Image (cartoon, rainbow, N blue to C red):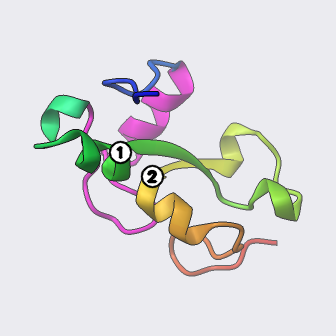
Amino acid sequence: MSLPLRPAESELFQSLWRDQAGQCALCGKPMPSTRFHVAHASIWKRERPTFDHIVPRAAGGPDTPENLQLAHARCNRIKGKSQKGSDGRVRT
C-alpha cells in the first residue's frame, strides 16, 4: 500500500504545523509538507509528518490536542513508547 502524497488536511494538523513552524518536535529539523518536497518516495516514508503523543497512549496518554505534536515518522518510531518529550522532559 502506498502512502498518501500529503498529510491529512485536518484543522488539528494545520494548527500544529503552524505552531511548530513545520519543524519536527523531536529533532527540530524541518518536515516536508508534501511528497514532492523530497527526492524519493522512500525519503517521504521516513520524513513525512506524523502525529506523536507526548505522553504515549501505552503510558496512559490521552488522545487530546494538548498531548499531540508533529514529528517525522522516523523520529516518532525511534521515540516509541518512551515518555521522553521533545525537549528531554519526562511528562507526568
Q: Which residue is mark 2?
A: 73
Neighbour class for label 1 at 10 Å: few (<14), some, many (≥20)?
some
Three-letter residue code for mark 1? Lys
Q: Main secondary structure of the magenta part?
A: loop
Q: Mark 1 = which residue?
A: 45
Q: Is residue 77 above or below residue 53?
A: below
Front residue (pair 23, 59): 59
Note whether 84 is above or below 44 in the view shown: below
In the drawing, does residue 24 fall left or right of residue 52? Answer: left
- Is residue 33 rendered magenta in the image? yes
- Coordinates of residue 59 in the picture (x, y in percent): 85, 64
Amino acid on which the number 2 mark rests in the picture: Ala
Instruction: Give the extent of the magenta segment.
Output: 11-34
Tag 2's secondary structure? helix
Residue 66 in the image: state x and y as whole percent.
68, 46
Residue 17 position in % (x across, y down): 39, 38
Q: Does the segment drawn in magenta span residue 21?
A: yes
Residue visible at 39% across and 48% down?
Answer: 20
Residue 3 is drawn in which quadrant? top left
Between the C-alphas of marks 1 and 2, the distance is: 7 Å
Q: Is residue 24 visible?
A: yes
